[in-house]
Image (cartoon, helix red, strand yellow):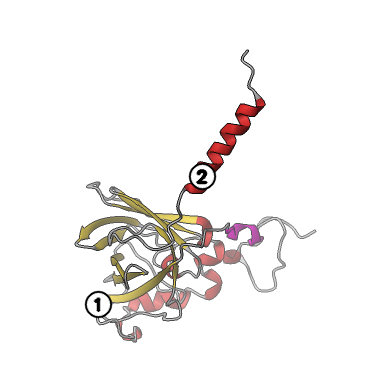
Amino acid sequence: MRRVVPGIVAAVLLAATAVHAQIPRQMTPSADAKDFNGLWVISNRGARGYLDQDLKALMVAPLLTPFAKAQMAKNTPELDPSAACLPAMPRHMSGPYPIHITQTPAMVTFLFEYETTFRNIYLDDRERPEDEARYMGFALGKWEGDTLVVETTNLNEKAWLQADGTPVTPTTKLTERIRKIEDGKTLEVIMKIEDPAVFTRPVFRQYLYNFKPDWQLSEYYCAEGNRDDPQNQKAGQPGSLGGAKGKRK
């Protein structure tokens, strides 16, 4: 058996530490307009609600279909899927927590601190699954100049489009145009939301994110605080310490 000299081990560890220390941090956004890598934090979260095609505030009530109005009347706050820690598009795009974007020529991935989930945007020629619904949907993207155009479908009907209970259906489609602006310091996402079952014409959202080179993702575990099943609670029902089927001790 070969003996390892402690002095050699120490030298190797010191060398490795020195190399690691020399790796530069990206303190400014990449000059490449197609490089979205890095950590971003939303800056316009207060500008909620739907917009028209000119990105002006929109009164959406007149655009809702009878089905949407009936469904929203049923979707009371205690039934909000987010109360059960379920992710959803586009709601995750407006979360107040950081998003780390990492990309390759074939895929762009959004790593959300919010509820510790992720979203893949595929840039290859793969086909959409026919009957597979996902909370974050299935996203295919392509470049148009320096703008990434993404179409997301296959959204899970259990999700909501936003906190007012606007429903998601099998015909919901999200089309995003993602680009860097302000010398790369800001990432802009303009999203068109189409669904003939919900809206009589398309509505829009705009998301703006600031580049944060000195931030990093932290742990986020919604499930740790969910001791009750909020979707099956009844008035006057005591909380439980063991989930929906547990008993209070």
Q: Residues within 10 Å of mark 2 (few under 14, many from 20)?
A: few
Dot 2 or dot 1, earlier in sequence: 2
Q: Residue furthest top?
A: 1
Q: Residue at x 51, y 44 (%)?
A: 20
Q: Residue at x 33, y 69 (%)?
A: 189
Which dot marks residue 181? none
Q: CA distance from mark 2 to mark 1?
A: 53 Å
- Secondary structure found at label 2: helix
Query: Which quarter of the figure is the C terminus placed in?
Result: bottom right
Name the mark nearer the viewer: 2 or 1.
Answer: 2
- Chain part drawn in magenta: 220-227
Q: Is residue 116 left or right of residue 64?
A: right
Cβ–Cβ under 8 Å for marks 2 and 1: no
Q: Tell me the residue that label 2 is attached to.
A: 20
Q: Residue 106's x, y, as percent? A: 29, 47
- Secondary structure found at label 1: loop
Q: Tell me the residue that label 1 is attached to.
A: 201
Q: Is residue 171 magenta-colored?
A: no
Q: Residue furthest left?
A: 145
Number of numbered markers: 2
Q: Residue 147's x, y, as percent? A: 24, 64
Q: Amino acid at mark 2?
A: His
Q: Is residue 161 left or right of residue 127?
A: right
Q: Residue 134's x, y, as percent? A: 39, 55
Q: Residue at x 56, y 32 (%)?
A: 12
Q: Residue at x 63, y 21 (%)?
A: 4
Query: Which quarter of the figure is the N terminus placed in?
Result: top right
Between 63 and 7, the one lying in front of the other is 7
In which quadrant of the rendered view does residue 186 lie?
bottom left
Q: Amino acid at mark 1?
A: Arg
